[in-house]
């Protein structure tokens, strides 16, 4: 398999109608590339949708403080979401790709930490707020400071685990696409995936 002129080139099917082993491997690699591209497109769409919802709701009211930080983080989230959508679309639908564009997408994914950091800051402010005004437990239940801190800490750990899982998922798709484009698919083989699956599944279990 060679990456040439932005397309995955494959060997020809044997003349007797049976698929040769190299051709079967090339088709499998091509299918994997489309799968990674489709998942990157889907995750990018989720990120962009949430970002634009925040931008529309905060554009006229965010002047300072946490609302302004949320708006800025949403802009960055929208940028990397659209970038991932573009790279994923070209791979899944057009069977094209560029190591440069995929590298840009993989780098922009790190901007995803910004909205999560804003969210963690919001949770931290809620933990230290007056128990009667906390954002976690309704005042009807007359929550104690200890109860607010406990629920807030669980929310903090849950969001942190979700952030690592979501950003790691985006990164896995982009880096897997890049390894195929660079002609080194073995860098993201099943062995690599199994190790990462244990890590991310454990984190998402913790989040739950």
Image (cartoon, helix red, strand yellow):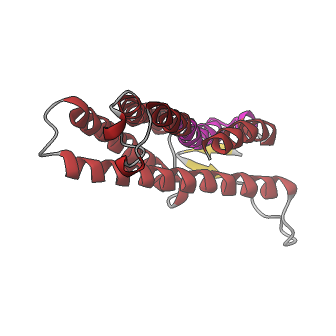
Report x, y in % for residue 188: 71, 37
Q: Residue furthest front?
A: 142
Q: Is residue 154 above or below residue 86?
A: above
Q: Could you tell me residue 90's position as x and y percent?
A: 47, 53
Residue 76 in view (yes/no): yes
Residue 95 seen by the camera: no
Residue drawn at (60%, 42%), measured in percent from left and top? 207
Residue 59 vertical placement versus 89 (above, below):
above
Main secondary structure type of the part rendered in magenta: helix
| Closer to us: 97 or 61 | 61
Which quarter of the figure has residue 62? top left
Give coordinates of residue 33: x percent, y percent: 63, 51
User: Magenta span covers which residues?
Assistant: 161-187
Position of residue 182 measured from the top left corner of the image (x, y, whole percent): 62, 35
Residue 12 painted magenta: no
Q: Which of 140 and 88 is in front in this view?
A: 140
**In the figure, is residue 29 to the left or right of 75?**
right
The residue at the point 50 percent across, 51 percent down is: 43
Asked whether, in this view, residue 30 is left or right of residue 14, the answer is left
Up/down of 115 relative to 11, above or below:
above
Front residue of this view, candidates 144 and 81: 144
Residue 172 is inside the magenta segment: yes
């Amino acid at each position: 398999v060679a990456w040439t002129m932005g397309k995955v080139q494959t060997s020809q099917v044997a003349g007797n109608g049976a698929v040769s082993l190299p051709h079967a491997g090339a088709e499998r690699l091509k299918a994997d590339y489309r799968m990674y591209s489709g998942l990157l497109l889907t995750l990018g769409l989720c990120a962009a949708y949430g970002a634009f919802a925040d931008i529309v709701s905060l554009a006229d009211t965010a002047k300072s403080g946490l609302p302004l930080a949320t708006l800025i983080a949403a802009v960055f989230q929208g940028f990397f979401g659209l970038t991932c959508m573009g790279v994923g679309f070209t791979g899944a639908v057009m069977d094209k790709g560029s190591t440069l564009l995929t590298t840009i997408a993989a780098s922009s994914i790190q901007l995803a930490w910004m909205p999560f950091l804003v969210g963690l800051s919001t949770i931290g402010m809620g933990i230290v707020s007056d128990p009667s005004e906390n954002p976690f437990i309704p005042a009807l239940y007359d929550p104690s400071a200890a109860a607010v801190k406990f629920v807030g800490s669980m929310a903090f750990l849950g969001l942190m685990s979700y952030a690592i899982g979501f950003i790691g998922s985006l990164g896995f798709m982009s880096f897997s696409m890049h390894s195929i484009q660079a002609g080194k698919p073995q860098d993201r083989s099943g062995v690599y995936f199994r190790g990462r699956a244990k890590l991310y599944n454990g984190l998402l279990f913790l989040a739950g």
